[in-house]
Amino acid sequence: MPTFFDPTADAAEASEALRGLAHASRGLDQPAEMYGVIGDLSSGMRSLRQVLDQIADVHERKVAHAFNDDGNHEAGVRDALAAAEELRQAANLVDRAYDRLADGFIAAGKIAWHPDPAVEEAAPSRWVNVVFFQGDEADRPLRILGELGHVDAVDYLAQWDYGDETTQAALENGYVYDEPVEGTNDQVAISGDYALVVNPHIGYVSLLRRYTEPDTEAQEAAQTGPPPMRDGPELLVSYSSPGAPKRTDLPAPKSDGSWFEPAKIAAVKQARGLGL
């Protein structure tokens, strides 16, 4: 929740909220819901423009206290004024973007979305096992989960998802479930087509992916074309995603927080070392 008095904490929360929206909007398939999303984004852009102007003002008002790392006041003043100018330019660009977004919002409000002409019964989906880690192997994903939240943990574990190959192996070995497996002490978090199952008491973590039985005609048609590289959903890129730089300095998971909560705002502030 916003504090309305701590700009550092509120900025961190706004960043996390936008990241969550970027992830959630990948699965937006109800057109009527988009109108409200655009409206909220319009409001957010107006606030962003105000924030940029206010931060620029602070750089100008506090210029007497500006020094560079070597203690040079003149250089600090130049940098403070340059930062203020760039922030104001950014605010102007946001203002122009808001105007275009407002036009899009008006146009979207004129649309009457109709349901699909032929509504077929959706094929039932099941869950296939992607990967299961326990003991020492589970330490890294559990640390990512504890410090950064379940989206980053899913991104990390998804590198073991090889699409059709993973699906076929799960089907052959019977690792297919009607619902994500959930024991007495298990915690489950859904992220797109993935389900993250964690038991912090026993120390294991597993990733499952939603699987829908393909119809025969579509499967035969797919065989005539080039095989897909991967049938899993596209993920947001984070440092824990495949191909991203690996970090080995992750702290141990917090014992007093929820496994499915992002890092505390206070921890973000301390890590960034921000101050006037």
Image (spheres, rainbow, N blue to C red):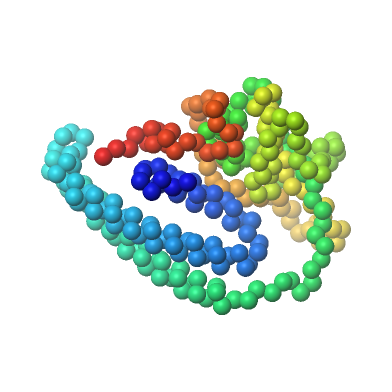
Q: Would residue 138 appear left or right of 16 to someone viewing this image?
A: right
Q: Would residue 228 appear left or right of 169 to someone viewing this image?
A: left
Who's the residue at 51% across and 65% down the image?
Answer: 38
Which residue is at the front of the view, 154 or 178?
178
Who's the residue at 54% across and 27% down the image?
Answer: 256
The C terminus sits in image quarter: top left
Q: Would residue 182 appear left or right of 242 to someone viewing this image?
A: right
Q: Is residue 10 above or below residue 69?
A: below
Residue 156 shows in the view: no
| Residue 167 image position (x, y, % from top left) | 78, 43
Which residue is at the front of the view, 202 or 231?
202
Q: Is residue 35 above or below residue 23?
A: below
Q: Is residue 158 above or below residue 89?
A: above
Q: Is residue 103 above or below residue 230?
A: below
Who's the residue at 64% across and 21% down the image?
Answer: 136
| Residue 86 image position (x, y, % from top left) | 27, 55
Farthest residue to the top: give it.
Answer: 136
Q: Would residue 75 appear left or right of 219 to someone viewing this image?
A: left
- Kindly indicate the quadrant of the structure image that contains residue 242: top right
Residue 25 shows in the view: yes
| Residue 111 image position (x, y, % from top left) | 59, 76
Farthest residue to the left: give it.
Answer: 74
Q: How many marks?
A: 0
- Kindly indicate the quadrant of the structure image that contains residue 53: bottom left
Which residue is at the front of the view, 211 or 7?
7
Who's the residue at 18% across and 50% down the image?
Answer: 61
| Residue 62 image position (x, y, % from top left) | 19, 46
